[in-house]
Image: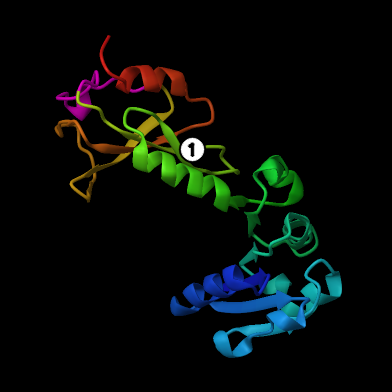
Amino acid sequence: MRVVIAGAGSVGRSIARELLSHDHEVTLIDKSAAAMRVSQVPEAEWLLADACELPALEKSGTEQADVVVGATGDDKVNLVFSLLAKTEFGVPRTVARVNNPKNEWMFDQSWGVDVAVSTPRIMTAMVEEAVAVGDLVRIFSFHQSRADILELTLPADSRVAGTRVGQVVWPADVTLATIVRDGRPLAPSGDDTLEAGDELLLVAGADADTDALQRLLVPKD
């Protein structure tokens, strides 16, 4: 797979190293000469240029890219880069970093973004997930399908504790994907019994009634 990354800062370089370790081809673009730390990711191709300019994207081989990643610290750059990659070069998949949560609403298909990754939101979700029991926490959202990955740690007096998975009537467009128990992920079957302390990972579609899901899983009245 060929990947072009806009932004050769610490985030861009980390993504590049991870992709290269999986045998992908990576090109890093940055307009700052100070960011050209080629020795830190010598296996990547490097380009000193503005990722928001068409000639730079042509030179980087964006037209042949399978995926582009907007990883700069500037939301405007990540948006423009994604839009150009999608509309001018027909890149199949674009991933963009969101630095300011207030800008999340712009990171959608109208700006050519297939997947938006908001570091502040992910960190917030991880904090909430670590301390919340009995509350649904949105871990990740897929912008293309608008589906969400939700997490809930089942409290001892949950309505469904002690109930077999196959007996639970889940709200429409909600699927139990994984049960994490004692640090081990389990693929749930209809015969598995939900236990207090289980960490449930659920996939909820865009039209799913998350309020109904919360009422199903919260402590009994």
Could one spot residue 217 in this view of the protein?
Answer: yes
Residue 221 covered by magenta stretch: no
Name above or below for residue 183 compared with residue 93. above
In magenta stretch: residue 166: yes
Residue at horizontal 21 percent and vertical 29 percent from the top: 165
Find the residue positioned furthest to the top: 221
- Give the structural element (helix, strand or loop) at label 1: strand
- Quarter where residue 52 is shown: bottom right
Task: Give the overall secondary structure of the magenta segment.
Answer: loop
Front residue of 207/12: it is: 12
In the rendered image, residue 108, in percent from the top left (x then y), is placed at: 68, 44
Residue drawn at x 53%, y 25% is 207
**Quarter of the image that includes the N terminus:** bottom right
Location of the C terminus by quadrant is: top left
Left or right: 32 with respect to 221? Answer: right
Badge 1 crowding class, 10 Å Cα cut-off, few under 14, some 14 to 19, many 20 or more, is many
> At which x and y percent is residue 164?
16, 27
Determine if residue 108 is in view.
no
Q: Residue 146: image x %, image y %?
A: 56, 37
Name the residue located 64 percent from the left edge and 59 percent from the top edge.
Answer: 92
* Magenta range: 157-171
Q: Amino acid at mark 1?
A: Asp
> What residue is shown at x 21% (from left), y 35% (from top)?
197
Give the image location of residue 75, x and y in percent. Answer: 73, 55
Q: Is residue 88 left or right of residue 69?
A: right
Looking at the image, residue 119 lies above or below residue 168: below
- The residue indicated by pointer 1 is 148
